[in-house]
Amino acid sequence: MPAPGGRLAPFATTIFAEMTSLAVATGSINLGQGFPDTDGPEQIAEAAVAAIRAGQNQYPPGSGVPALRQAVAAHQRRCYGLDYDPEREVLVTTGATEGIAAALIGLCEPGDEVVVFEPFYDSYAAAAAMAGAVSRMVTLRAPRWSWDPEDLRAALSPRTRLVLLNSPHNPTGKIFSHEELREIARVCVERDLVALTDEVYEHLVYEGAHAPLATFDGMRDRTVSVSSAGKTFSFTGWKIGWACGPAELVGRVRAAKQYLTFATGTPFQYAVAAGLTAGDELIEPLRRSLRARRDLFCDGLEALGLTVYRPGATYFVTTDVASIGEDDALAFCRGLPARCGVVAVPSSVFYRDPAPGKTLVRWAFCKRPELLRDALARLEALGR
């Protein structure tokens, strides 16, 4: 039988699978994947247990349990002043990754073009390919991860359907400024484009504040905003996400989502609803803890001689290994487990053309402080 090809052929394997296998094989500390090594708030975990014991274990409504849709709508109103009808304008998804995939499949037609800021979370290009859409890149440039508005306009064509924005941004930790968001909004309105925003790190901000694109002039009714509980509450394995937007657009996302996974994790939906309702009481301690871990790890990497681009948000920090004489981050990361007993990810995998990320490495600092200290101690071998 011939090997399968087609539009998903470039996405058959991921660097994360390779690096995780290396971590297991070498007993290395895995700072490649973005998941915490501790659980989130006990109050939310107990709410999931209570839901299971109360018999909330069968299929929920396809759009999500009403309690969670109402909690998401209340969260958007409380945090950003955005009003959404929980019945028609909020959709629960199996994590943000499915929400983004369902949005691209539901909102794009084959041949449509999607503008994406690179480096980008690796599922974006794959999901666009599933939709038969073509990705067009606008490149963020270190050290400030800035971009030229003319590059955005140059990426547009008569086939452009959608702008996909991730802010706070993985992998760089960039928070798009109000000026940048106004420019993106201006382009969307002028060209009558839809915006799809990935806001999973909305509460893990250490410098400044997150502003949803939907709050800018003309954007509420042309934006589908996606987020999830995984990052906000450190329950990444629960895969509870949501999409908010105007009813017409959310209806198209729902049409795609119902054939991907009709529904997801009923008891976890009730638990996340409880967490969102509790608000900052549960979110703020995690944010402060992660900021401290960011500083601990970034300070340690700088002490090792690495050029560090300290992030304003997210789980991740990017370094330039050229500062320690390395000229190929992919080779550096493949050799790092044997050399130091630590796993990281080369940022080149987050670019369409890997050249801008050739010497950049992404590290996850969402781990226990003692594990980060151990990793830094192991990385001292880089200087030997």
Image: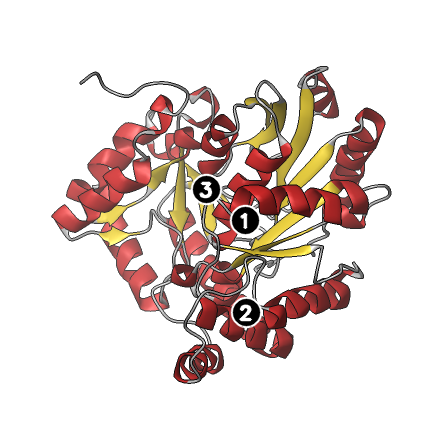
Q: Please report whichever mark, 3 or 2, sits nearer to the chain's N-terminal start.
A: 2
- The percent position of residue 235, horizontal first and vertical second, equals 43, 65
Q: How is the image coloured?
A: secondary structure
Task: State yes or no: discs 3 and 2 in contact (Cβ < 8 Å).
Answer: no
Q: Find the distance from the CA under tag 1 to the CA under tag 2.
A: 14 Å
Q: Find the distance from the CA under tag 3 to the CA under tag 2.
A: 20 Å
Which quarter of the image is occupied by the C terminus? Answer: top left
- Residue 183 lies left or right of residue 10; in this view the side is right
**In the rendered structure, which amino acid carries the disc numbered 2?**
Arg
Q: Please report whichever mark, 1 or 3, sits nearer to the chain's N-terminal start.
A: 1
301 or 86, nearer to the observer: 86
Residue at 30% across, 55% down: 376
User: Which label sits on residue 288?
Assistant: 2
Q: Is residue 45 above or below residue 212?
A: below
239 or 203, nearer to the observer: 239
Task: State yes or no: discs 1 and 2 in contact (Cβ < 8 Å).
Answer: no
Which quarter of the image is occupied by the N terminus? Answer: top left
97 or 331, nearer to the observer: 97
Under tag 2, what secondary structure? Answer: helix
User: Which label sits on residue 318?
Assistant: 3
Under tag 3, what secondary structure? Answer: strand
Residue to which mark 1 is pinned: 311
Task: State yes or no: discs 1 and 3 in contact (Cβ < 8 Å).
Answer: yes
- The percent position of residue 19, horizontal first and vertical second, equals 26, 41
**In the rendered structure, which amino acid carries the disc numbered 1?**
Pro
